Image: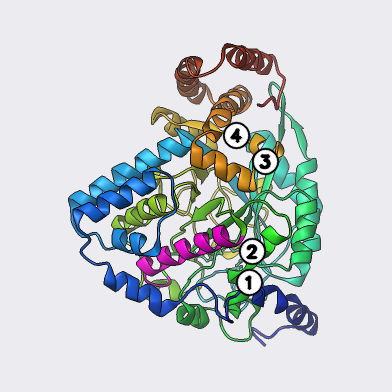
Amino acid sequence: MLGVLTKKERDWVESVIKDEEIVKYMENGRDFIDDDDIWERLQRNTKPDKNRIRDIIQKSLEIQTLEPDETASLLNIEDPDTWHEIFQVAKEIKRKVYDNRIVTFAPLYCGDLCVNNCLYCGFRRENVVIKRRRLGLDEIRKEAEVLAGEIGHKRLIVVYGEHPSTDAGYIADTIRTIYDVKVKTKNGYGQIRRVNVNIAPMSVDDLRLLRDVGIGTYQVFQETYHHGTYKRLHPEGTLKSHYQWRLYCHHRALEAGVDDVAIGALFGLYDWRFEVMGLLYHARDLERQFGIGPHTISFPRLEPAANTPFIQATNYRVSDEDFKKIIAVIRLSVPYTGMILTAREPASIRREVLPIGITQTDASTKIGIGAYSDRYTDQEEDRQQFLLGDTRSLDEVIRELAQMGYITSFCTAGYRCGRTGDRIMTLLRTGREAVFCKLNAVLTFREWLDDFASPETKAAGEQVLKKEIEEIKDKLPQNVYEKLLEYYRRIEDGERDLYF
Ligand code: SAM
Ligand code: SF4
């Protein structure tokens, strides 16, 4: 019967949630999202005057996390001129903390079996039109070889449904397999140097296992912060229906020694202003309990998925105009955080919103199970979680970014020399991370242009590199500048993975 779990699945589902790993983080038995309080703040902070907005802007420019009432004030702005000013400030903060760098990555879907029934997702277990499978380790290797050896990605985010066949043990095996891949390229070799995960909430023990195989960022989206909506969209009895098990999974990850955690909300499930407040409260609670906020925040919009009528029926679809406001308000509210824009969005929107705060984006994206090595070019509804808005290649995206004045960074050095967690927070807040990142962006971009770029992209990229190197010259001590030039030459001669 549809939706009914096998005994094995049922036993597994019953073993996952550990109440003691939730309650220890709660206060007086309550989580940190108070729905009524959020609505009250949104209603209390309407019609903010110019002075108040000016003070808030000042605080954001000092790279301080905002108070809930301050974010509520921004969300209530009505005047188009003030919004215009907010977009400009968002741009300025992005430049101040991350300069003109954009990091690129690709998602790698490893399995679409799922015990849950999230109403908005193509992978929900009751959806019979989806072809279900998990990739074997040989297939994972092939996927990684295409991504690292042909396209030139250095960072992946691996994605799975929630299922006993793709549990922490399997996830650990897939990550080891990916890190193991090394492919000869035109001038050097290609390798995935950072594997982030977008997976279900896990126990501290499982998270330790993942930490030990070297996961990068642990990313989980709360989907909606509104308790009632969460309950409605994640049917009772499913593993995912436990709101707090999900809400505190990043706390558990930090407890387990995973340094970087990433939060997000799926926009289109509930009121967007409420969700932005939820993200802020989430960031603030992580800061309060661990001194570390989210490494990144994601704000995906709901996309169509095969046989998933909820998506057409939602009352909370987010317009392009409001999407831009969401991005700007997050940028001002949690100014140090990375912000991820995905290929769910069409190219025209990506172009428009990129400058107001985005730090990471994916390209050459395929989300069908096994789609990279199968060389599927079209999207395939029956093996995708949802449909993408932008399927341009990494080469095309990088060319466009270069033409817009951005340098694509493939740097993963920060993580490998311990610039993570609370150390990265301090570096970001003070703007010092920018120095290392700039140098490493130059070196890794050079590598990529030599190994993977088309002639047009190489030409556009080299113009950016020339400008960058000239700009850095005056800002660096002479010996560091000389070292940069030396590394640069060695990379041109075929050496790889040199970093500061
Ligand atoms: N299954 C795990 C989970 O739910 O946590 C792993 C992540 S799931 C495969 C990836 C994310 O895709 C979800 O957290 C959700 O926010 C997003 N998603 C689901 N359905 C979507 C849709 N129709 N459009 C856009 N994003 C969607
Ligand atoms: Fe499963 Fe995740 Fe989709 Fe929910 S969002 S049905 S948990 S894959």
Q: Quote the CA–CA distance across marks 3 and 4.
A: 12 Å
Q: CA distance from mark 4 to mark 2?
A: 28 Å
Secondary element type, mark 3? helix
The residue type indicated by label 3 comes to Tyr
Q: Along the polypeptide, which appears first: circle 3 or circle 4?
A: 4
Residue type at mark 4: give it: Phe
Q: Label 1 is placed on what type of residue? A: Tyr
Helix, strand or loop at mark 1: loop
Closest to the camera, between mark 3 and mark 4, is 3
Task: Examine the structure image and report whether residue 271 is included in the region drawn in magenta.
Answer: yes
Residue 447 image offset from top left, x and y in percent: 63, 24
Q: Residue at x 25, y 46 (%)?
A: 85
Is residue 72 located in the magenta-colored stretch of the structure? no
Q: Residue at x 55, y 57 (%)?
A: 287
Q: Dividing the image into 4 quarters, which one contains the C terminus? A: top right
Q: Which residue is mark 3?
A: 415
Q: Residue beneath label 4, please?
A: 410
**Mark 2 sits on what residue?**
251
For label 3, count other residues whose C-alpha is less than 10 Å away and answer few (under 14), some (14-19) or many (20+). some
Q: CA distance from mark 2 to mark 1?
A: 8 Å
Nearest-to-viewer mark from 3 and 1: 1
Residue 373, given in percent of the width and then of the height, sits at 68, 46
Q: Are marks 2 and 1 in contact (CB under 8 Å)?
A: yes
Residue 151 locus on image (x, y percent)? 62, 36
- What predominant SS class does the magenta segment belong to? helix
Task: Depth check: give the residue in front, 165 or 276.
Answer: 276
Label 4, residues with CA under 10 Å away: few <14, some 14-19, many ≥20:
many
Q: Quadrant of ligand 1?
A: bottom right
Name the residue tied to disc 1.
25
Give the residues drawn in magenta, as a range. 269-289
| Residue count near mark 2 (Cα–Cα under 10 Å), binned few <14, some 14–19, many ≥20 | many
